[in-house]
């Protein structure tokens, strides 16, 4: 450690003048203030999430049905194979299902515009854009820009919607009583708001409306783009490898052979091993979240002997881990058989970390995997996806892994089952 500190003294790096200049000193102090504010915010967010590990799995019903935009895709492809931007359509679908699971609210946003959903989509793109201009790091300057004003307006819409649902639900709960409200919902349609309204912390206190709203907003944000990216890239990989696509379709057809395809159940999700392998391999090759950050609370010794000192904030590349040839031979090849149960027994549990690892890993991963399986199954039973040869697909890492200019695939409807 001593050598690091020694190397970083102002004198050594020729910053002696900085220390004596009053104006620059003031600037450094302001910068330090904003850095502290940023760390404070992240810390608070983490602590709140940690207390609320209460979202283990989605409701055990066909909670996605009616949320797949099937009619819309059928309309778009009525005249034959049509090129569709996966991200645009699938983001609306994931928002639609989240809004249903979080609020029990049917926005039908895949068919008609929704102010709430439009605001969430706008906020996601503004948040991704904000770090690229230096002046945007200072809140009051950012709020004077047109992006900043749009950001505030969209936040107001989202907060108003959430506050309204919470208030109404609280009223219903107090009028009807908790038991009467929850009895008909047992094991079926209890949504995230219900879970949070009845949750208590270690001291037996309920959450305030503000706490609940903060959790709801976090889940809406963390849960829609990530899953949309995951699903878009699975469809892309299956379009690139039609034999794997056919194999998945056959597996699902066999599983649901004597049932209506809309009758897919929670138990079915563990009966599609090959489809699950294809999803995992896609999350390896195209992880929705490409990197995470960690604040080292102790010195960390690396395998090569180097030490990351306590206090340092590190970026950890999930993308890099998943593409490391020492961990994954021929990392650029899409090969679902890497996830054959026998092969994956040999792998370190930290070789595949699309949902991160450790106590701060993704709280929504069971939900996300279930959503990916259901949506992929129902899509493959109704449509064939192929590469659109007129479009070049290039990865674009933003907050999540996107594709430059969208991810366009040719979608062709399959004949309906007689
Ligand atoms: C394919 C889909 C998804 C992927 C790849 C993904 C990935 C991740 C990753 C890498 C993290 C960061 C954890 C860390 O810093 O170590 C995270 C955190 C989080 N995710 Fe997900 N996620 C997905 C879907 C979801 C869904 C559907 C929800 C909610 C419905 C969700 C809610 C959250 C929350 C609340 C956190 C913060 C957890 C904490 O700090 O304790 N995610 N996710």
Image: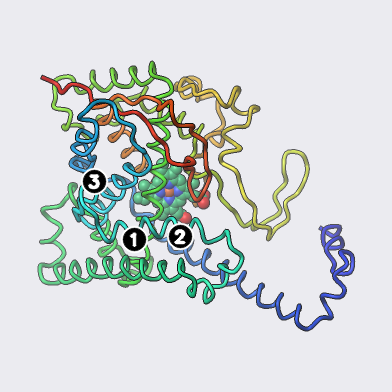
The CA distance from mark 2 to mark 3 is 32 Å
Q: Is residue 158 left or right of residue 142?
A: left
| In the foreground, 411 or 342 | 411
Which residue is the site of mark 3? 59
Residue in the image at 73% along x and 39% along y: 303
For disc 2, the neighbor class at 10 Å (few under 14, some 14 to 19, many from 20) is some
For disc 1, the neighbor class at 10 Å (few under 14, some 14 to 19, many from 20) is some
Residue in the image at 49% along x and 52% along y: 360
Q: Which circle's residue, 2 or 1, is located before the other in the chain?
A: 1
To which quarter of the image does residue 230 belong?
top left
To which quarter of the image does residue 152 belong?
bottom left
Which residue is the site of mark 2? 126
| Mark identifier at residue 364 | none
The CA distance from mark 3 to mark 1 is 26 Å
Q: What secondary structure is found at the residue carrying circle 1?
A: helix
- Residue 253 picture location, percent across and down: 23, 20
Q: Is residue 108 left or right of residue 406?
A: left
Rendered position, 381 above or below 154: above
To which quarter of the image does residue 192 belong?
bottom left
| In the foreground, 200 or 197 | 197
Residue in the image at 14% along x and 24% along y: 259
- Mark 2 C-beta closer than 8 Å to ligand 1: no
- Mark 3 C-beta closer than 8 Å to ligand 1: no
| Mark identifier at residue 119 | 1
Q: What secondary structure is found at the residue carrying circle 2?
A: helix
Q: Which circle's residue, 2 or 3, is located before the other in the chain?
A: 3
The CA distance from mark 2 to mark 1 is 10 Å
Q: What secondary structure is found at the residue carrying circle 3?
A: loop
User: Mark 2 and 1 residues: CB-CB less than 8 Å, in contact?
Assistant: no
- Residue 315 picture location, percent across and down: 62, 50
Q: Quadrant of the C terminus?
A: top left
């Amino acid at each position: 450690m001593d050598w690091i500190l020694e190397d970083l003294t102002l004198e050594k790096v020729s910053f002696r003048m900085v220390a004596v200049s009053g104006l620059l000193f003031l600037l450094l102090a302001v910068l330090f203030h904003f850095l502290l504010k940023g760390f404070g915010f992240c810390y608070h967010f983490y602590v709140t999430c940690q207390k609320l590990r209460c979202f283990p799995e989605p409701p055990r019903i066909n909670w996605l049905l009616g949320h797949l935009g099937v009619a819309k895709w059928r309309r778009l492809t009525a005249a034959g194979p049509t090129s569709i931007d996966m991200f645009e359509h699938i983001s609306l679908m994931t928002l639609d299902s989240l809004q249903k699971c979080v609020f029990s609210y049917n926005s039908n946003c895949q068919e008609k515009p929704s102010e709430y959903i439009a605001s969430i989509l706008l906020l996601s793109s503004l948040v991704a854009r904000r770090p690229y201009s230096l002046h945007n790091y200072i809140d009051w300057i950012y709020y004077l820009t047109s992006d900043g004003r749009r950001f505030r307006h969209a936040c107001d819409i989202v907060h108003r919607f959430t506050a309204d649902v919470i208030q109404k639900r609280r009223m219903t709960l107090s009028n009807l009583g908790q038991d009467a409200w929850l009895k008909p919902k047992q094991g079926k349609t209890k949504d995230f708001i219900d879970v949070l309204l009845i949750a208590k912390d270690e001291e037996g206190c309920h959450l305030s409306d503000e706490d609940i709203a903060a959790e709801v907003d976090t889940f809406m944000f963390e849960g829609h783009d990530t899953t949309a990216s995951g699903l878009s890239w699975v469809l892309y990989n299956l379009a690139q490898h039609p034999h794997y696509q056919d194999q998945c379709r056959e597996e699902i057809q066999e599983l649901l052979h004597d049932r209506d395809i809309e009758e897919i159940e929670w138990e079915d999700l563990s009966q599609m091993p090959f489809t699950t392998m294809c999803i995992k391999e896609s999350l390896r090759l195209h992880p929705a979240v490409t990197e995470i950050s960690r604040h080292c609370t102790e010195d960390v010794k690396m395998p090569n002997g180097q030490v990351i000192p306590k206090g340092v904030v590190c970026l950890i590349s999930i993308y890099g881990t998943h593409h490391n040839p020492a961990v994954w031979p021929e990392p650029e090849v899409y090969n679902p058989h890497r996830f054959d149960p026998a092969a994956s027994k040999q792998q370190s549990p930290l070789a595949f970390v699309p949902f991160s690892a450790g106590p701060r890993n993704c709280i929504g991963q069971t939900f996300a995997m279930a959503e990916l399986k259901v949506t992929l199954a129902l899509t493959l039973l109704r449509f064939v996806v192929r590469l659109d040869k007129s479009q070049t697909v290039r990865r674009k890492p933003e907050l999540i892994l996107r594709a430059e200019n969208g991810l366009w695939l040719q979608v062709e409807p399959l004949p309906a089952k007689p």
